[in-house]
């Protein structure tokens, strides 16, 4: 299998789409399923592999066991977020627009994580604000 083809968007012809502009070509759908499978594996390993970093940052920001529980629970709530993805796909009627919206959300929540650390660096007395911003960012990113 040529792994370079996994990350390239193919040029679609009208016979590969149905009337709702959804892809019907079996080869493209198969390749997309492989992409989602790889993403799921990477997410699961990230969840278990990077949790000590979340623990370190939450403790650095002054958080306790409840804050750690929120960060840990956010990963298991990610299946509920798939409902948002289905909503975006249905109402935007474009995979590209929905993926761009999801990417924008990911960038926003990533910036919130970085912003939380910046808030703590600017003024250590704002640790509660920094912890709240970090929890929002980590929950949104999950």
Image (cartoon, rainbow, N blue to C red):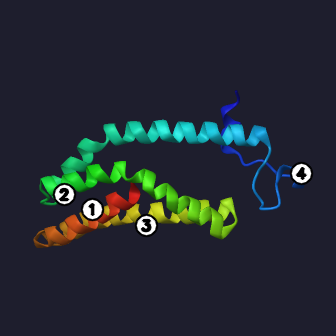
Disc 2 + disc 4, Cβ < 8 Å = no
Count residues near mark 4 (Cα–Cα under 10 Å), then give few for <14, some for 14-19, many for 20+: few
In percent of the image, x 51 and y 65: which residue is there? 104
Using the numbered discs, state the Cα–Cα distance from disc 2 to disc 4 in whole angstroms. Answer: 51 Å
Disc 2 + disc 1, Cβ < 8 Å = yes
77, above or below 44, in the image = below
In percent of the image, x 50 and y 55: which residue is there? 82
Q: Quadrant of the N terminus?
A: top right
Using the numbered discs, state the Cα–Cα distance from disc 2 to disc 3 in whole angstroms. Answer: 20 Å
115, above or below 74, in the image = below
28, above or below 95, in the image = above
**Frontmost residue, 10 versus 85:** 85
The answer to which of marks 2 and 4 sits earlier in the sequence is 4
Using the numbered discs, state the Cα–Cα distance from disc 4 to disc 1 in whole angstroms. Answer: 46 Å
Please state which of the two labelled residues, at mark 4 or mark 3, is closer to the viewer.
4
Residue 94 in sight from this viewpoint: yes
Please state which of the two labelled residues, at mark 1 or mark 3, is closer to the viewer.
1
Q: Quadrant of the C terminus?
A: bottom left
Please state which of the two labelled residues, at mark 2 or mark 3, is closer to the viewer.
2
Secondary structure type for disc 2 = helix
Secondary structure type for disc 3 = helix
Count residues near mark 2 (Cα–Cα under 10 Å), then give few for <14, some for 14-19, many for 20+: some
The answer to which of marks 2 and 3 sits earlier in the sequence is 2
Q: Is residue 45 left or right of residue 28?
A: left
Q: Which residue corresponds to mark 4?
A: 15
Image coords of residue 79 (percent x, y): 44, 51
Please state which of the two labelled residues, at mark 4 or mark 1, is closer to the viewer.
4
In the picture, the disc for residue 108 is 3
The answer to which of marks 4 and 1 sits earlier in the sequence is 4
Q: Is residue 67 left or right of residue 142?
A: left
Secondary structure type for disc 1 = helix
């Amino acid at each position: 299998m040529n792994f370079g083809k996994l990350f390239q968007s193919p040029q679609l012809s009208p016979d590969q789409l149905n009337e709702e502009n959804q892809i019907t070509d079996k080869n493209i759908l198969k390749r997309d399923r492989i992409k989602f499978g790889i993403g799921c594996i990477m997410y699961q390993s990230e969840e278990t592999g990077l949790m000590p970093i979340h623990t370190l940052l939450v403790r650095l920001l002054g958080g306790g066991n409840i804050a750690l529980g929120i960060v840990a629970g956010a990963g298991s709530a990610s299946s509920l977020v798939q409902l948002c993805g289905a909503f975006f796909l249905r109402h935007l009627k474009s995979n590209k627009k929905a993926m761009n919206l999801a990417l924008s959300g990911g960038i926003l929540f990533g910036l919130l994580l970085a912003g939380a650390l910046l808030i703590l660096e600017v003024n250590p007395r704002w640790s509660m604000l920094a912890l709240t911003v970090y929890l929002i960012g980590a929950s949104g990113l999950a």
